[in-house]
Amino acid sequence: MNSDPRSPLPDPRPADSVPRSSILAPSSDFVLEVRDLRVSFQTVEGDVRAVDGVSYDVPRGKVLAVVGESGCGKSVTAYSILRLIQKPGRIVGGRITIRPRKGEPIEMTGLREDDELLYRVRGGLVSMIFQEPMTALSPVHTVGNQICEAIRLHQPLSHREAEARAIEALAKVGIPGPEKRIHQYPFEMSGGMRQRVVIAMALVCNPELLIADEPTTALDVTIQAQIMNLMKRLKDDLGSAVLLITHNMGVVAQMADEVAVMYLGRVVEQGTVREVLKTPRHPYTQGLLASLPSLSYGRPRLPSIRGSVPSMLELPRGCPFHPRCPQFRTGLCDRGGLPPLVPLGGTQKAACVRADQIPAGIVAGEVIA
């Protein structure tokens, strides 16, 4: 049993042995606070600022969806939270604070790489569902051994007790015959089953924050819906917060409470899911919503945002989205520095110099009622 007085890890008892009020009673409004996070990668062509001043909060018991195209810094931000950025990448500025229900706040960027607390936070207080289950699971160990290892790293249980907990976890995520499945290897399972194993491993220690990095990318739409419904149900049962990394605006409408839209390493719009999807104010958010497939007459089958995400080594001057923006104004959008996030009412903010002039996109009405 860990006796380190700094430890903020949750009660190691099973969730069903802890009073419900104890599980859900918050000690702070937010389980995660990210402030002005900056992450750079040193390359032979120059320094790439993959994350450039990102700030957001994850409310306790809620889902924050971080959305945007590939290459916009969503996953780099998520990996930074657990200090999983590998060289030549490094966090060059900002603050990442985790606020557990019990114990003092943890400043993740202040921990040494060999700090024992850092290893106990990973998988205990904060867990992650990786994008591809075949790379997240070891091919030479049974799924039962891998789940048991995760349990015993964070909880003082015997192997037999951990195995019982693993079987229970597999049953909770809807895997039939979990007593037999724990003895199987990942290659003996379908893609949907492997992703359920990854979710079971992430949730088995009752984390206060679950980071889900594109958790359904490699799955067909039927399994995607099942996995999303499963994550939502388990989140509600455990009272955990979720940081959901995705490019799928339909998933955002289904799962999220709040949204942060990222482009080229920065948050360009944020607010509640209803604010952002009903009344998007940044042209990039409007473009993402307009790119959703539609059966409406008069609309192209596969609309898209013109152009592509530019190289972070050759960022445009002014607003980085202006070369692709249908609302672009010469001499305004291509001048000066990066536009700041401007409050637009409620909790909604947008980083656009014309945000108060651009009508909210009515296309969002097809996404959320």
Image (tube, helix red, strand yellow):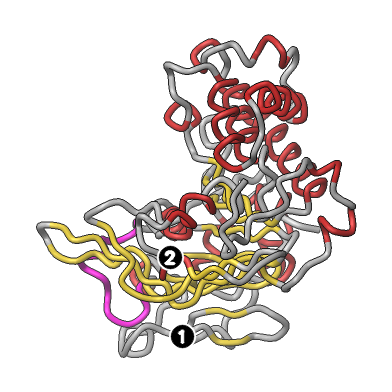
Question: Where is residue 203, by image quadrant?
Answer: top right
Q: Position of residue 100 (x, y in %)?
A: 66, 64
Residue range corresponding to the magenta coloring: 308-320
* Residue bearing the label numbered 2: 263
Q: Position of residue 338 (x, y in %)?
A: 37, 83
* Residue bearing the label numbered 1: 340
Tell me, yes or no, whether the highlighted magenta stretch contains residue 313: yes
Regarding mark 2 in the picture, which secondary structure is present there? strand
| In the foreground, 243 or 355 | 243
Question: Which disc number belongs to residue 72?
Answer: none
| In the foreground, 284 or 256 | 256
Magenta span: chief secondary structure = loop
Q: Position of residue 257 (x, y in %)?
A: 73, 62
Question: Where is residue 205, by image quadrant?
Answer: top right
| Local crowd size for mark 1, using a 10 Å CA cut-off: few (<14), some (14–19), many (≥20) | some
Residue 350 relative to residue 93: left or right: right
